Amino acid sequence: MSSQIKPPFTELTARSKVKAAQDAWNTRNPEVVVQAYTVDSRWRNRTEFFKGREAIKEFLKRKWAKELDYRLMKELWAFTDNRISVRFECEWRDGDTGQWYRTHGNEHWEFDNDGLMRIRDMSANDIPIQESERRYRG
């Protein structure tokens, strides 16, 4: 589990933390994903602000009910003692329209001493794509 990777981060442990997050999110299972966050974790996801594991679970359930066939790639951008920044791309098919999208974004993470994420700040843009343009399949 990614919480076993604790600060202070080195390049190796930061890359491992990012890979663990990518793998967890690609399960599309809110129960799995939420284990990487503190009980009172604070999130900004685009224009939404919320706090706590229950709110995170509800957000992820809504997200993956709409974003079908979701597949994510995360890449380490920078790190310090207890913070990591990543760039990401994900692809998904809109459950209402069937339109494929690629989302490009950045996330800034802050961790507690136990390796759980206490702050997640995310910005992203969605770009419509054709299914034939997909880069990530799973």
Image (spheres, rainbow, N blue to C red):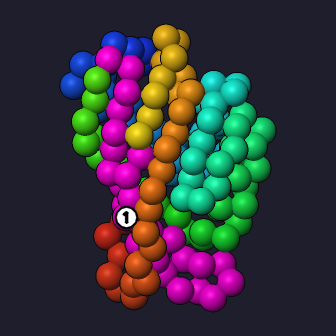
Q: How many marks?
A: 1
The residue singled out by tag 1 in the image is 104
Residue 68 located left or right of residue 5: right
Amino acid found under the numbered disc labelled 1: His
Seen at 57% across and 47% down, the residue is 44
Near-viewer residue (10 or 51) = 51
Q: Quadrant of residue 67?
A: bottom right
Near-viewer residue (46 or 23) = 46
Seen at 69% across and 27% down, the residue is 40
Q: Dominant secondary structure of the magenta stretch?
A: strand
> Callout 1: helix, strand or loop?
strand
Near-viewer residue (126 or 130) = 126
Seen at 45% across and 56% down, the residue is 123
Q: Residue 38: horizontal and vertical position, in percent?
A: 63, 25
Seen at 43% across and 83% down, the residue is 128
Magenta-drawn segment:
81-107
Q: Is residue 74 above or below residue 92?
A: above
Q: Is residue 64 visible?
A: yes
Residue 15 located left or right of residue 67: left
Q: Residues within 10 Å of mark 1 (few under 14, many from 20)?
A: some
Q: Is residue 77 above or below residue 133?
A: above
Q: Which image quarter is the C terminus in? A: bottom left
Specify whether residue 102 is painted magenta. Answer: yes
Q: Residue 88: horizontal and vertical position, in percent?
A: 36, 54
